Amino acid sequence: MAEIAFADLPPTARFVLRGRPAAVDAAGTALGFALPGVACRAAGAGERAALWLGPDEWLVLAPEAEGAALAAALEAAMAAAAHSLVDVGHRQDGFVLRGSWAAVVLNAGCPLNLDPAAFPIGMCTRTVLAKAEIVLWRTGAEAFRVEAMRSFLPYVRGVLAEAAREFAA
Amino acid sequence: MLLIDCPYCGKRPELEFAYGGEAHIARPQDPAALSDDEWATFLYLRTNPKGTHAERWRHVHGCGRFFNAVRDTVSDVFAATYRVGEPRPDAAPRKAGE
């Protein structure tokens, strides 16, 4: 396996969900799994995932083909409770960074402690990478998913590619 | 790097945070009843202490939440952080490095 590699993601539907527990519990029913209640953790089932971004805020990911149906199902499930469900699929995109040096490369621009003890698999958070804001999700021991605003992506990938040159095979 | 203890996310690097001014300033219930001097005091005059200071911070590149912190303005040591709505803790200032 290459020591560091970028991988594109299949087309993905993205939503930011905000609401109080009543709405969040209902959303979990529509989604198929409970939204993570623990800070900075992701939950998922199949190809769907929900990432904790704040005490009342989650990033919901699903395959693009399921997006419209999922949005309708979420809206229907949460109809009785105040909530906000925003489609951010056109706003942000992401990629996967994997390899034995992935954490080191990310640390070229990200000040978080990415040691597996401090940032275990399944942990996710909004943070900074150089001059851009990203959402970072550790999906494996040597794999991170990076999500950023669409217009920042060339910059984010450029910063990481620059840092990865040192570890190129 | 200076680590700030977000009440929601735990210890995080300073880069993720934004300063939000002095904490525990209550907006007057009836601004129209105030004199110009009293209104100007509410708007502009802050205590600006040398030493421990209760202030607002926002974890802007994290959970996005505002919270309050007690910080020593001389040493930049954070003595305590706590959620909005909670009373200011009587935290003894931590020594640098704690």
Image (cartoon, rainbow, N blue to C red):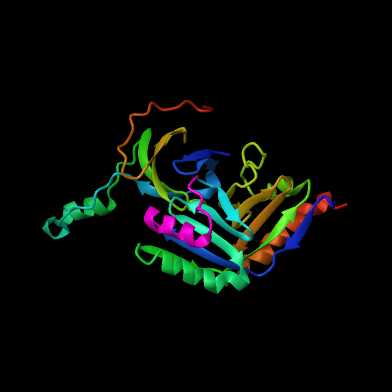
Give the extent of the magenta segment.
A19-38
Residue A153 visible in the picture: yes
Task: Give x and y (percent) for residue A72.
Answer: 48, 72
Q: Quadrant of residue B85?
A: top left
- Farthest residue to the right: give it: A169
Would you say A154 lies left or right of B74 here? right
Q: Which residue is found at the position 17% from the left and 52% from the top? A: B38
In the foreground, B92 or A121: A121
Residue B22 is situated, as x and y percent measured from the top left of the image, at 34, 45
- Write the residue at 47% across / 52% down: A54
Pick the front one: B12 or B94 = B12
Count the marks.
0
Residue at position x 60%, y 46% in the image: A123
> Does the magenta segment cover residue A21?
yes
Is residue B64 left or right of A105 when viewed as pictured?
Answer: left
Asked whether residue B61 is in view, the answer is no
Question: Residue drawn 65% across and 57% down?
Answer: A146
Residue A73 x %, y %: 48, 68
Residue A53, position as x, y percentages in the image: 51, 53
Instruction: Name above or below for residue A33 compared with residue B90.
Output: below
Q: Is residue B12 above or below residue A151?
A: above
Direction from residue A92 to residue A158 in the image, left or right: right
